[in-house]
């Protein structure tokens, strides 16, 4: 796989690679991994939001429930 980056983004990537002593490929791979994890979390949140059987409680109720568990 290959990608083309706008010059400004490439400069930022090169600067971070130099300062962190990491290859650019490592930084790009880590950025993609984090993005994919965030997208998976986002998708799960959307699914739960649209699940009419998923209980919705207030923050006050959550605190009460957590206090009872401790």
Image (cartoon, rainbow, N blue to C red):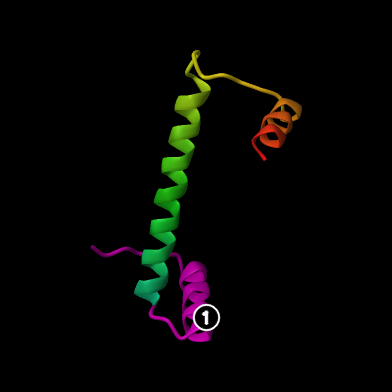
Residue at 73% in and 29% down: 64
Q: What x and y, as percent, mark residue 35? A: 44, 52
Q: Which residue sits furthest right?
A: 60
- In the rendered picture of this protein, how many numbered marks are placed on residues? 1
For the record, the magenta segment spans: 1-23
Q: Position of residue 24 (x, y in %)?
A: 39, 76
- Name the residue rendered at 37%, 73% in the picture: 26
In this rendering, the answer to whether 36 lies above or below 10 is above
Q: Out of 7 and 24, give the one closest to the viewer.
A: 24
Up-down relation of residue 14 to residue 30 (above or below): below
Q: Secondary structure at mark 1?
A: helix
Of 46 and 66, nearer the camera is 66
Indicate yes or no whether the magenta region holds residue 9: yes
* Quarter of the picture holding the N terminus: bottom left
Where residue 67 sits in the image (x, y, percent)? 72, 36
Which residue has dot 1 on it? 15
Task: State the image coordinates of residue 45 (x, y, percent, origin top left).
Answer: 50, 32
């Amino acid at each position: 796989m290959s990608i083309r980056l706008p010059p400004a983004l490439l400069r930022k990537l090169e600067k971070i690679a130099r300062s962190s002593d990491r290859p650019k490929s490592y930084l790009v791979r880590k950025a993609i991994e984090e993005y994919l994890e965030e997208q998976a979390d986002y998708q799960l949140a959307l699914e739960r939001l649209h699940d009419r059987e998923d209980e919705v409680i207030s923050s006050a109720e959550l605190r009460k429930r957590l206090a009872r568990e401790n």
